């Protein structure tokens, strides 16, 4: 089988359409949910004790590591070698931050610099399936 | 000034990001097929595990010392690497991604290079969770050495560090001291054969080499050594090489003379295009990671169909056997009976250069052999075809896959052993990390 070189086409990629100039950009969920793609990760939730903040079992959370946590942030924290979801709360009287457990079975954890507890990232969106 | 950013124990650091329980523990990552150790945590280094050690030799020790052993998870490492390199490219215009975990870039601040790099390292650690070291010097060779100094601080006690993970070699006094305490074998570009030659000629450290007679060594060992010597003398011989922008993709396709209905004939056409595309890849010294196949009917046909699918390979390749296997798989997926097709084609993209690939895998001896064989095979095919005419050696459509193999162990390379691989945390929806509400 001999090949004819002339018949081989090299293009940059993609196929220009005559309608290209008239198409408005399609809505892009990636752009909407991911403000910083280098620092954004996804995780999946196990457990349903955060229903009160709108996080359900099996939801996908969008996590941005570049953000600075503020009061009431929902965060992914690394505690005892495990990644968990917590709410960051500031104690009104004693003025320190602690990770509040929405699950009654777990204690609140006070944040101080020498503990092994690390804030891994800030939850920015939750993706919840209704079907 | 030239900076070299190097991710610390990169593969182990990627694993730790999603498995915090691995923190402060000895961890090793194995090469493809669980062959040998290619990444070690500092704790594993301290226990005496060496780079490139075959796994079977240390299997018992890892159990005894409770060293965590992981198979390599290249889709995870490639994704994390892309993130780091993108952060770097957004900040600096001239970046050379040298390997999966290293990049060179230019710095032009007079006095703030270390501060700028320290900020950069902080940002990468926060955003992506990977610790990095950045060595700064006048040349690439010296930047490499500077980076090494950061990682082996105990060998360079006289050096004062303003930051723990960034170092610019500023004064000649520091430079001489560093070079004196760097063995020739640890210089970038000095292999074991050259280092033996140098030691036999009483050139034991980088300082000796810098102050040696470059013309004598060049005569014996070639121009590259001379360049290394110049680089040690702060004379720039290697520039930052930005990635190829010439070719972003290779597309080979053609409309059929007549409409084709049956799968077999489309496959026969595609196989020719795949062959052509791979030849182009080889001629441009490229490896690709992305294979796209498209199949369509004429736009004016009664029943219009057009579809395409892209397959991302875990590692870049130029192996026609693998690329064909992937292409065939995609074509089978795309093909639907009952349409009159008039065009099929292949687009290869996501390129890396040959040099880059080989260098990033220097430590991975097993892998290196397969890459070398891939290149050898493709060069032989090309030579024969040049001599005897295009298409003399080519793939056979519809044949048993065994025909494509020249290895003694068929199929082995497709079914890799990776008994301890972590999940594809960032590239597969089913594998994203689970987090408990606690």
Image: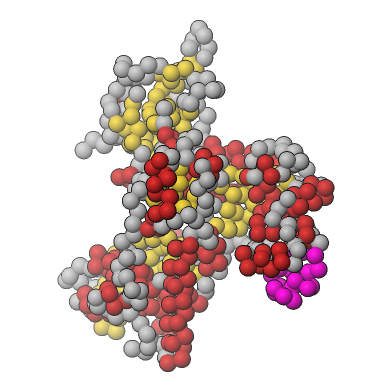
Which coloring applies here?
secondary structure
> In the image, what residue occupies the spot 70% across and 73% down?
B221
**Image position of B65 with respect to B238: above or below:** above
Q: Is residue B41 left or right of residue B424?
A: right
Q: Residue B329: image x %, image y %?
A: 28, 66
Pick the residue in front: A121 or B182: B182
Q: Is residue B29 left or right of residue A131?
A: right
Pick the residue in front: B236 or B29: B29
Residue A72 visible in the current orientation: no
Magenta part of the chain: B212-230
Q: Residue B252: image x %, image y %?
A: 40, 75
Q: Is residue B121 left or right of residue B381?
A: right
Q: Magenta region's main secondary structure?
A: helix
> In the image, what residue occupies the spot 46% across and 91% down?
B387
Indicate the quadrant where residue B321 lies. bottom left
> In the image, what residue occupies the spot 38% across and 29% down?
A84
Q: Residue B123: image x %, image y %?
A: 58, 39
**Image position of B295 with respect to B210: above or below:** below
Residue farthest along the top direction in this orientation: A93
Residue farthest along the bottom direction in this orientation: B388
**Image position of B87 with respect to A109: above or below:** below
């Amino acid at each position: 089988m001999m090949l004819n070189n002339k018949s081989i086409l090299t293009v940059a990629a993609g196929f220009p359409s005559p309608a290209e100039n008239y198409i408005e950009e399609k809505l892009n969920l990636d752009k909407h949910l991911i403000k910083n793609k280098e620092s954004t990760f996804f995780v999946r939730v196990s457990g349903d004790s955060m229903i009160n903040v709108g996080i359900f079992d099996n939801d996908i959370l969008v996590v941005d590591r570049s953000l600075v946590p503020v009061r009431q942030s929902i965060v992914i924290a690394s505690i005892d070698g495990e990644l968990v979801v917590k709410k960051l709360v500031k104690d009104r009287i004693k003025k320190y931050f602690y990770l509040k457990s929405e699950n009654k079975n777990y204690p609140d954890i006070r944040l101080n610099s020498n503990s092994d507890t690390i804030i891994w990232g800030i939850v920015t969106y939750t993706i919840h399936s209704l079907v | 000034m030239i900076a070299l950013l190097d991710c610390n124990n990169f593969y182990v650091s990627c694993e730790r990001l999603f498995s915090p329980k691995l923190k402060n523990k000895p961890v090793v990552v194995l090469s493809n097929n669980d062959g040998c150790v290619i990444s070690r945590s500092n704790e594993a280094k301290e226990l005496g595990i060496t780079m490139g050690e075959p796994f079977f030799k240390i299997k018992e020790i890892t159990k005894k010392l409770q060293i965590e052993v992981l198979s390599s998870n290249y889709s995870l490492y490639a994704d994390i690497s892309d993130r780091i390199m993108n952060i770097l490219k957004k900040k600096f215009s001239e970046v050379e991604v040298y390997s999966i975990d290293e990049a060179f870039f230019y710095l032009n601040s007079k006095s703030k290079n270390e501060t700028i790099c320290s900020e950069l390292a902080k940002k990468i650690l926060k955003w992506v969770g990977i610790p990095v070291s950045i060595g700064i010097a006048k040349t690439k060779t010296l930047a490499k050495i500077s980076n090494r100094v950061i990682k082996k601080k105990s060998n360079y006690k006289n050096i004062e560090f303003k930051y723990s993970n960034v170092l610019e070699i500023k004064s000649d006094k520091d430079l001489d001291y560093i070079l004196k305490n760097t063995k020739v074998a640890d210089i970038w570009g000095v292999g074991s054969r050259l280092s033996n030659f140098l030691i036999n000629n009483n050139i034991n450290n980088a300082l000796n080499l810098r102050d040696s007679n470059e013309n004598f060594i060049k005569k014996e060992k070639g121009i590259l050594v001379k360049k290394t010597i110049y680089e040690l003398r702060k004379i720039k011989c290697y520039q930052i090489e930005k990635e190829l922008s010439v070719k972003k993709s290779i597309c080979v396709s053609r409309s059929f003379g007549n409409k084709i209905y049956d799968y077999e004939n489309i496959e026969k056409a595609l196989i020719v295009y795949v062959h052509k595309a791979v030849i182009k890849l080889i001629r441009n010294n490229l490896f690709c990671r992305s294979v796209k196949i498209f199949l369509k009917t004429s736009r004016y046909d009664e029943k219009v169909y057009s579809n395409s699918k892209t397959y991302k390979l875990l590692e870049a390749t130029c192996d026609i056997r693998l690329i064909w296997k992937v292409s065939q798989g995609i074509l089978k997926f795309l093909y639907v009976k009952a349409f009159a097709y008039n065009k099929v084609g292949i687009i290869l993209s996501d390129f890396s250069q040959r040099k880059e690939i080989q260098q990033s895998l220097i430590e991975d001896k097993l892998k290196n052999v397969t890459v070398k064989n891939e290149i050898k095979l493709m060069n032989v095919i090309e030579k024969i075809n040049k001599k005897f005419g295009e298409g003399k050696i080519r793939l056979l459509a519809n044949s048993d896959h065994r025909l494509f193999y020249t290895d003694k162990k068929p199929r082995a390379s497709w079914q890799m052993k990776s008994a301890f691989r972590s999940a594809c945390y960032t590239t597969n929806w089913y594998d994203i990390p689970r987090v408990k509400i606690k």
